[in-house]
Image (spheres, coloured by chain):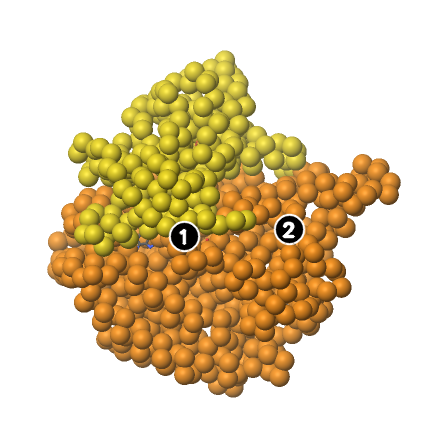
Amino acid sequence: MEHYSMNLTLKVWKQKNAKAKGSFETFEVNDISSEMSFLEMFDVLNEKLIHEGKDAIAFDHDCREGICGTCSMYINGRPHGPWHGTTTCQLHMRAFKDGDTIVVEPWRAKAFPVIKDLIVDRTSFDKIIQAGGYISVNTGSAVDGNAMPVEKDNADKAFAAAACIGCGACVAACKNSSALLFVAAKVAHLALVPQGAPERKTRVMNMINVMDKEGFGSCTFTTACEAVCPKEISVTNISRLNQEYFLAGLTGDK
Amino acid sequence: MPNSKIPAGPLEQKWTDYKGHCKLVNPANKRKLEIIIVGTGLAGASAAASLGELGYKVKAFCFQDSPRRAHSIAAQGGINAAKNYQNDGDSVFRLFYDTIKGGDYRSREANVHRLAEVSASIIDQCVAQGVPFAREYGGLLNNRSFGGTQVKRTFYAAGQTGQQLLIGAYQALERQVALGNVSMYTRHEMLDVVVVDGKARGIICRNLVTGELERYFGHAVLLCSGGYGNVFYLSTNAMGSNVTAAWKAHKRGAYFANPCFTQIHPTCIPVTGDHQSKLTLMSESLRNDGRIWVPKKQNDTRKANDIPEEERDYYLERRYPAFGNLVPRDVASRAAKERCDAGYGVGTTKQAVYLDFKYNLINKYGRVEAGKLGIENPDIETLVRLGKEVVKEEYGNLFDMYEKITGENPYEVPMRIYPAVHYTMGGLWVDYELMTSVPGLYCLGEANFSDHGANRLGASALMQGLADGYFVIPYTMGNYLADEIATKPIPTNHEAFEAAEKGVHARINTLMNIKGAQSVESFHKRLGKIMWEKCGMARNEKGLQEAIKEIQALKIEFWKDVKIPGSIHEMNPELDKANRVADFIELGELMCLDALQRNESCGGHFREESQTEDGEALRHDDQFMYVSAWEHAGESNWNLQKEVLEYELIKPSQRNYK
Ligand SMILES: Cc1cc2nc3c(=O)[nH]c(=O)nc-3n(C[C@H](O)[C@H](O)[C@H](O)COP(=O)(O)OP(=O)(O)OC[C@H]3O[C@@H](n4cnc5c(N)ncnc54)[C@H](O)[C@@H]3O)c2cc1C
Ligand code: SF4
Ligand code: FES
């Protein structure tokens, strides 16, 4: 792999706090190596800003290996940037070339208010989970792990759905700011394992109610979410959610 | 000597007896008792959920925006349990024995035995929560093997086991939030423990969104704040992982145990340059299927695939025929360093060795798949293609991660890997009940020192974190709180809270007013460099003494010249980082001091002065069969307390993986 170095222009959203009005500011960064990650490029920029006596740019990040779901930059009009199936922190600078201008914004959605610069508040996702994204089993009351075999195909599908990292890119990409892919991933995960069966009906109803209450829009199935999801969560999970919802409505005695 | 409160009686009976006799709190009284939990990774989330279920009033804190983001999420390879589903001779005793031996005989028998005993229940609990572990075609749970053992006892979910376990614990926690038993405070950083009349009674936090300091009361305080590997700057830990919570507790009287016991993981993606902010692990489970080698010729510049089989040195298989590529981590790391230091390293920096999947892709998986499909005499190409499918299912996410970072396809060319800081066996000293030396202050998970001795075996940290949170603390907590039912909540305007908050406020003010010239990051990098070079994979007396001096000088420079942008009463990640780095600097000094006094090699701690003829770690049981528990006694000043380790069941011997 050939390595190269580049100079870049960055247009970054700056916003002092939730109440302030934000705007784009332009920054130049030089000698960026193609081996760096996108966030390491931001580290370089922040070091430079600190030395110049300016405020650093606030952005969310933690694991830097694509699994915690913290990083959340909207890069050149696409959540997490140009690479398919990749989080912001896994994006590497070899995706760019010398002289490029890169525009970076926070997630934009009513249910994800900006806290500062590129950082948004995603606690609405936790609230959706609180509404039913679990199996009610207290510690100590479980039966043997092999007491209930799970068909491998279902186990694999459940795992694929459970791989969601709760980043919110699906919401950021959706013109309606719908959180349905996130909700569907959880509903599908728990519907596909036998342990989740007893709560199937209430789970989907309650999670969708809270999703609406938190200010996420409704799904018009544009599948923009799937296209940007860094974990490639499939929209077939949304079909499964619809089935679950239908079933619950049909048989649920509310 | 600190009292470890190990129950009397035969080893196999201790935990059962303890549970049968510990004090209990009745349900009505539980509702009156408040518990603070700092950290909601595997240890903290499992504890918060379980204690909430019992009816205690729990307040839980984390610095991320959600408990689901704790560093536990990044664990890849798997979790051990003595289920013996494979019928390959596993048992509680064997898991106990492997862990004690793996830890090079520097852990407590009673704790480790308990860990092995509860391990099976963890798997049951997680399955009940819906954790999608890997399964066989028959629908039953699958296992893989990890280093330092000869059985298959590791449960996994591709290379995302930590994620799936944490999501399970997180969901259990959020369920308790919904039920009103747990209050969750995200984006909060604990900056001090409040001690009233000798007992831990609360914490001071910085609200990371507003910058304000806040006070919280609890009848007991649990620290579940993770490991301190980031003291080395570069490690496989998440960027936010830090020692601050544990360090504040240490300064309030909690002993810090075995701080120098650090795990350097053999298989990580090598450093590429100065811009590097973190290192990425390639799970140990890959050593099930990958073979490690370097060229037989020094400074060989050929591409890996151009080097013929007979010119490759599979040095682990050569040196350790019994365990081969699956020797414990400390052994594998040192062996890689030895080869690179001797001039056999590969890649541009020559600080790397190969981890090669070709052989097993073809021979282990390819042939089996071909057999299943009834393909006779398959050619190599077919075997590779079939093998790839299986490998993808096992570790697909890791291979993708590797390719994103390096731009190379590990299905085609061997991975380049090198050891990196990964885990800290040391941590706050705790007794059998997981209580620190401050009454009412507990420590769980990676933040404590308890179970792994001088070296942790793979897939045992997840097991320990969940054992502590799901199955140990619900019992030991009651034993303490039973005597606290008459204690009324202490109002947070109590003088101890006032004083603690004042101290935190003063420190933050001081930091912000230094207005120096060097960034926090630059100090952290310098600290990391000292630690890696002088308190890393190999240590010696001279280097450690130098390191202590250098760190003391760095500390003075930091407090004179650090530059933090922004202000106090707002979100300010640079200020948060400064708080953490200041604590890392102090910890670094203690780690070197600990490494200096332990003039033996054991597990991950390798003192060059103490090795066998063929370069293996040489213990000195006659002098060092103890846990070093350091008591803070003022600036750059510590008292060493020794907890002598006594082995009832196992006879310590020189470890041998040959
Ligand atoms: C890349 C990687 C892969 C791994 N793979 C495996 C594996 O396959 N198997 C295995 O057994 N182990 C593995 N480990 C080790 C294992 O993941 C960790 O040891 C374990 O998850 C630690 O869990 P914990 O709950 O103790 O801490 P963490 O998960 O680190 O959680 C710490 C918590 O404390 C909070 N916190 C910290 N400080 C403060 C503060 N001051 N105020 C408020 N909150 C605070 C954080 O917000 C977080 O919630 C791996 C580790 C790494 C780095
Ligand atoms: S579904 Fe995909 S995009 Fe949406 S939160 Fe989950 S991982 Fe992120
Ligand atoms: S920082 Fe964790 S997913 Fe990007």
Look at the numbered disc 1 and give the secondary structure of its residue: loop
Image quarter of residue B388: top right
Which sits earlier in the primary sequence, circle 1 or circle 2? Answer: 1
The disc placed on residue B413 is 2
In the shown orientation, is residue B54 left or right of residue B355? left
- The crowd level at tag 1 (other Cα within 10 Å; few <14, some 14-19, many 20+) is many
Work out whether residue B454 or residue B20 is closer to the camera in this orientation and state it.
Answer: B454
Give the drawing colour for chain A. yellow
The disc placed on residue B238 is 1
Q: Residue at x 49, y 30 (%)?
A: A185
Q: Chain of mark 1?
A: B
Q: Residue at x 73, y 53 (%)?
A: B359
Same chain shared by disc 1 and disc 2: yes
- The crowd level at tag 2 (other Cα within 10 Å; few <14, some 14-19, many 20+) is some
Q: Are marks 1 and 2 in contact (CB under 8 Å)?
A: no
Relative image position of residue B463 (x, y in whole percent): 52, 55
Look at the numbered disc 2 and give the secondary structure of its residue: loop
Q: Judge: label 1 CB < 8 Å from ligand 3.
A: yes
Quarter occupied by the N terminus of chain B: bottom left
Relative image position of residue A65 (x, y in whole percent): 46, 47
In the shown orientation, is residue A103 left or right of residue B415? left
Q: Residue at x 80, y 36 (%)?
A: B373
Relative image position of residue B128 (x, y in whole percent): 54, 40
Q: Chain of mark 2?
A: B
